[in-house]
Amino acid sequence: MAKKREIRRPERGAQRAALERALQYVQARAWVSAEGLLELLLEEDPASVDALHLLGEVCFAQGRLDEAVRLYDRALAIRPGDAALHYNRGNIQHALGRYEDALRSFDATVARAPDSAVSHYNRGNALRALGRDADALAAYDRAIALDAANADAHLNRGNALRALERDAEAVLSYDQAIALRPDHADAHWNRAWALLALGEYLRGWPEHEWRFRRGAAALPPPVSDAPVWRGDSDPSGKRVLVLSEQGAGDTIQFLRFVPLLTERGATILLELPHALRRLCAPFSEWAVLIDRDAPIPPHELQIPMASFPLAFRTTLESVPARIPYLAPDPRLAREWADRIGLEGAGLRVGLAWAGNPVQGSEPRRGVGLAACMPLLDVPGVRWFSLQVGPRAADLAQAPPGRIIDLADAITDYADTAAAIAQLDLVISSDTSVVHLAGALGKPVWVLLMFAADWRWLRGRSDSPWYPSARLFRQPRAGDWDSAVRDLRRALIAAAKGG
């Protein structure tokens, strides 16, 4: 979220005219001219706080953040009580991801300027980045008390409430942000997540469409000028381009809707990421499969996959759950049966502990192998790692021979599906493996972070999306030990045949 920076009028004295000119350069974003003049001023007077301040602005604007911090540190050494300097230094530290340092700067700011709404707001942002959502909520409340017209403060207050699983209250905060700024895409989109987590699907799906309007954070828009099918027209006899979007797990989740569109007489052009192409090969009997980034054939309509629930007016009671709607390739299944070995006692359990590292929530969403270690000593279980990508290296933490690593033989989701088909159970944090196992109808136990993604709803141990899923939730943010302990008890019972 953009943070307002403080630029003061220059100090009085012999340098006043030159500082005024430098300020004009900064306000005009004439960075080269501003920097040259300010460096000359600092050669003449190294203790000029205004020159240090303005040069810090120039460095910040050009992405030279560490240099900007050093300039503000120099200025604060001369004038330690200056709230604006602490404030700007906090913004830079936040941009650098140094949230503890940013919080200290904002603490210093509000101590000196307690009625600065924007300082309380940015302090709340630092607290949220540190996972201190209750404290962030108090900071946003103070910011709003000082400036109730700040739409972003209402937005981020809603985000803090949602992180505390207070979704109904979060909706009210998003409503306030939207009332102040009706086109606030982030407020609409986050409102969707809160409503969907509450199971209020018919209210949530229209808001979810704002995902394409979120500025730099927006998803790519539909790829052609063809109208987007929203369920309000007859697609019979038309070619409909179905676009995958977001991660592989989202694509797998929403694939269930594609057959419903064929039942309405549409010809399907199904665009997929390459990693899902082999898995979805059976769809080629009734759809044209297109690799992502390949040329798009002519079509009359299009729909992004995550817009299917809106088009079909999906409610909790009408979630399509014709499970399985994916199946492993029989040839691959035989190969994986030989690789895994179906003989021998004990439950065959697949384990995955981390998702796509690109996903912003992954550091909180992924359970990690270390937290899963108490599961590995459950008697009567044979463990197989389904983890791929960089986090597969975490297997070095496990006792030698305790988990059989399958990663080297997994090339795409078709292989993962064939491997899962040979297992009795899959255990994973919120990853695409969960969606795949659920779509295959395989029992899957999911370790969920507190305030989990909307699709897992709130307070449930089951899922309308995946009838074979069982959910084990953190009782509080960061508490994987309790969730793993609950799952371990269930696994002991399952291994005993209970």
Image (cartoon, rainbow, N blue to C red):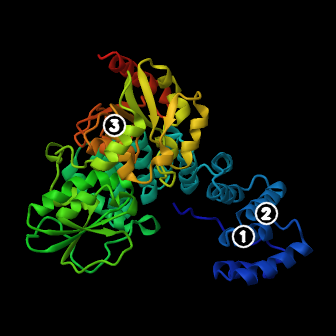
Residue 94 falls left or right of residue 165: right
As drawn, the label of residue 422 is 3
Q: Residue flagged by tag 2: what amino acid is it?
A: Leu
Which residue does the image show at 23% across and 81% down from the upper left?
298
Is the residue under label 2 in contact with that under label 1 (CB below 8 Å)? Answer: yes
Q: Earlier in the sequence, mark 1 or mark 2?
A: 1
Callout 2 secondary element: helix
Q: Is residue 399 left or right of residue 66?
A: left
Circle 2 crowding by C-alpha within 10 Å: few under 14, some 14–19, many from 20: many
Residue 242 percent location from the top left of the image: 25, 67
Instruction: Give, as a three-letter code, the residue at label 3.
Output: Gln
Q: Could you say where residue 350 lies in the image, as x and y percent from the top left? A: 41, 35
Q: Residue at x 58, y 27 (%)?
A: 399
Label 1, residues with CA under 10 Å away: few <14, some 14-19, many ≥20 = some
**Residue pointed to by mark 2:** 71
Q: To which residue does mark 1 refer? A: 59
Q: Earlier in the sequence, mark 1 or mark 3?
A: 1
The part of the image, by quadrant, that contains residue 443 is top left
Q: Is residue 310 shown above or below 267?
A: above
